[in-house]
Image: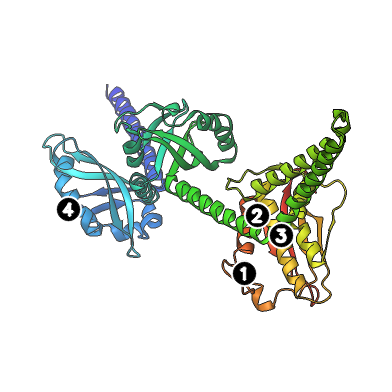
């Protein structure tokens, strides 16, 4: 019997030893986990004193774990966060025993680290007395700073006067800032608004067919669109962005729209002013070309008078003259009338007030029209006006009357410079390739050139070196060229004599 009891006792002892060994192994395992994790594992007394701290304290706070033992965690809280913790701590101690808080904790170096701590209380099963508090803390500084940045950006988006819209994959607007809600009467709560409600048909087609595919590929797009409000169409400068953050579904876009109504109105007003000034300049040029105009009119009128007198005289001397005998003078009269009408149409189109219309043109035709206006003036001054144009020039993009006005201004300036300079008997107009899809038309004279002191100011409004000049011709000419996508420049002088002005023009194909 004693032998049986002894065997049973030994078995129980071995079982207990095995159980203790298992518990020790499990303890070592949990100890290893606590010491290996990047989170700070800690145990605290009721007053917050550290009873244990894991090795992560070294990496997160700069403390050796032993330095924290016996130190109250409350002493290391940021003062602004401590009162909040103490006000809520009864929930930790006396209710469910579980609590999570984000706060700032002072590191050994003196700076504060944002911590997110999950706390759990342990109590005596019999008495309910608090034994200790177990905490798991992790550094959430990056997350907190990112959230603060997002909040600041959200405040900026909400307060900006631009219309900010957020678009989902279904191409419905699900969120908008205050400016957009107010302008387009959008709801503040749940929002599912179709794009067609806010953009006109042309802008909507551009968004769907061009913008969104381009943004999906390149990340962003900017350009002008038209939005629709209760007060009518709203021109906007739009920036469209796609969300490429991790986990974001494709098809999410942000549309930032800036109202450019005022800018558009100002640009339209500026264009009207420019057109008015250009019109006045053409009238002034027409006055300067008065002798040429008179010559253009007198020639056909004189020819018409001669043919008419001859026909009347012939009919008077031969009353029974067949009508066929008058066919030739009548045909000549008709030719001169057509020529006169053509000249008058040209002069009327040159001086009338009109808006610019840039379109493909044959450069030679514009040059011929400008030469026709200035030809008589040059002949009267005995200055030769020649052109040197290479064969096969591509068509250019310009407004015909505006370009003709620029050429006429340059030709008249060149003629004025030639009149005052002995030996200046020729003005040459020539063209050459100056870049891809670009050519340069140049007007070169043999006058005194432009003084170095004047080369920087010659295109300024009201600058002139002539007593009778208004100082607007070159300023208007440069403005006209820029409005057509070209340029007007003074070429640096290669010699002591003469000036050369270059007109840069866009072409349909490579020049």
Q: Nearer the viewer, residue 163 or 121?
A: 163
The numbered mark at residue 291 is 3
Return the residue at label 1: 469
Residue 248 locus on image (x, y percent): 47, 34
Among numbered discs 3 and 4, the one appearing first in the sequence: 4
Give the vertical position of 425 relative to 352 (above or below). Answer: below
Q: CA distance from mark 3 to mark 1?
A: 18 Å
Disc number lying in front (3 or 2) = 3
Residue 117 locus on image (x, y percent): 29, 45
- The local crowd at label 2, few if under 14, some if 14 to 19, many if 20 or more residues have their Cα within 10 Å, is many
Q: CA distance from mark 3 to mark 4?
A: 96 Å
At numbered mark 3, what does the secondary structure look like: helix, strand or loop?
helix
Among numbered discs 2 and 1, the one appearing first in the sequence: 1
Number of numbered discs overlaid on the protein picture: 4
Q: CA distance from mark 1 to mark 4?
A: 82 Å
Residue 130 locus on image (x, y percent): 15, 42
Residue drawn where x is 68% and y is 49% of the image: 347
The numbered mark at residue 422 is none
Q: CA distance from mark 2 to mark 1?
A: 21 Å
Residue drawn where x is 76% and y is 62% of the image: 377
C-beta proximity under 8 Å, tags 1 and 4: no
Q: Nearer the viewer, residue 122 or 457?
A: 457
Disc number lying in front (3 or 1) = 3
Q: Nearer the viewer, residue 130 or 421?
A: 421
The numbered mark at residue 83 is 4
In the rendered structure, the answer to whether residue 387 lies left or right of residue 293 reads: right
At numbered mark 2, what does the secondary structure look like: helix, strand or loop?
helix
Q: Nearer the viewer, residue 102 or 260?
A: 260
The numbered mark at residue 481 is 2
At numbered mark 4, what does the secondary structure look like: helix, strand or loop?
helix
Q: CA distance from mark 3 to mark 2?
A: 28 Å
């Amino acid at each position: 019997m004693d032998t049986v009891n002894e065997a049973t006792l030994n078995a129980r002892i071995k079982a207990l030893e095995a159980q203790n060994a298992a518990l020790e192994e499990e303890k070592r395992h949990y100890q290893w986990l606590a010491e290996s994790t990047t989170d700070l594992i800690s145990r605290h007394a009721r007053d917050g004193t550290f009873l244990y701290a894991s090795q992560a304290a070294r990496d997160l706070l700069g403390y050796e774990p032993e330095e924290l033992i016996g130190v109250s965690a409350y002493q290391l809280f940021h003062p602004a966060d401590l009162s909040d913790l103490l006000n809520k701590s009864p929930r930790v101690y006396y209710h469910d025993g579980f609590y999570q808080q984000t706060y700032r904790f002072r590191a050994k170096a003196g700076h504060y680290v944002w911590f997110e701590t999950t706390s759990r209380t342990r109590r005596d099963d019999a008495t309910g007395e608090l034994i200790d508090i177990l905490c798991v803390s992790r550094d959430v500084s990056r997350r907190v700073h990112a959230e603060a940045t997002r909040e600041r950006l959200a405040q900026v988006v909400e307060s900006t006067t631009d219309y900010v819209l957020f678009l989902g994959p279904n191409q419905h607007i699900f969120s908008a800032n205050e400016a957009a809600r107010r302008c387009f009467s959008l709801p503040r709560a749940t929002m599912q608004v179709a794009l067609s409600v806010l953009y006109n048909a042309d802008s909507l087609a551009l968004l769907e067919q061009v913008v969104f595919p381009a943004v999906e590929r390149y990340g962003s797009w900017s350009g002008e669109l038209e939005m629709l409000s209760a007060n009518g169409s709203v021109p906007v400068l739009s920036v469209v962005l796609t969300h490429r953050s991790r986990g974001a579904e494709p098809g999410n876009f942000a549309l930032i729209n800036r109202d450019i109504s005022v800018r558009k109105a100002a640009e339209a007003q500026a264009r009207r002013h420019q057109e008015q000034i250009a019109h006045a300049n053409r009238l002034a040029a027409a006055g300067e070309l008065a002798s040429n105009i008179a010559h253009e009119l007198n020639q056909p009128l004189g020819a018409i008078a001669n043919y008419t007198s001859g026909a009347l005289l012939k009919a008077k001397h031969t009353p029974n003259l067949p009508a066929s005998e008058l066919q030739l003078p009548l045909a000549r009269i008709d030719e001169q009338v057509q020529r006169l009408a053509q000249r008058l149409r040209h002069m009327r189109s040159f001086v009338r007030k009109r808006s610019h219309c840039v379109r493909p043109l044959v450069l030679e035709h514009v040059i011929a029209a400008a030469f026709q206006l200035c030809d008589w003036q040059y002949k009267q001054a005995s200055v030769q006006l020649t052109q040197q144009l290479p064969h096969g020039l591509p068509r250019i993009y310009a407004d015909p009357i505006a370009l003709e006005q620029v050429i006429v201004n340059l030709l008249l300036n060149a003629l004025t410079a030639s009149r005052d300079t002995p030996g200046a008997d020729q003005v040459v107009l020539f063209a050459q390739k100056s870049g891809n899809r670009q050519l340069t038309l140049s007007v070169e004279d043999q006058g005194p050139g432009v003084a170095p002191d004047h080369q920087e100011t010659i295109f300024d409004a009201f600058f002139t070196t002539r007593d009778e000049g208004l100082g607007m011709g070159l300023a208007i000419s440069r403005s006209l060229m820029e409005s057509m996508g070209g340029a007007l420049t003074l070429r640096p002088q290669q010699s002591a004599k003469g000036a050369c002005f270059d007109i840069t023009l866009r072409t349909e194909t490579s020049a």
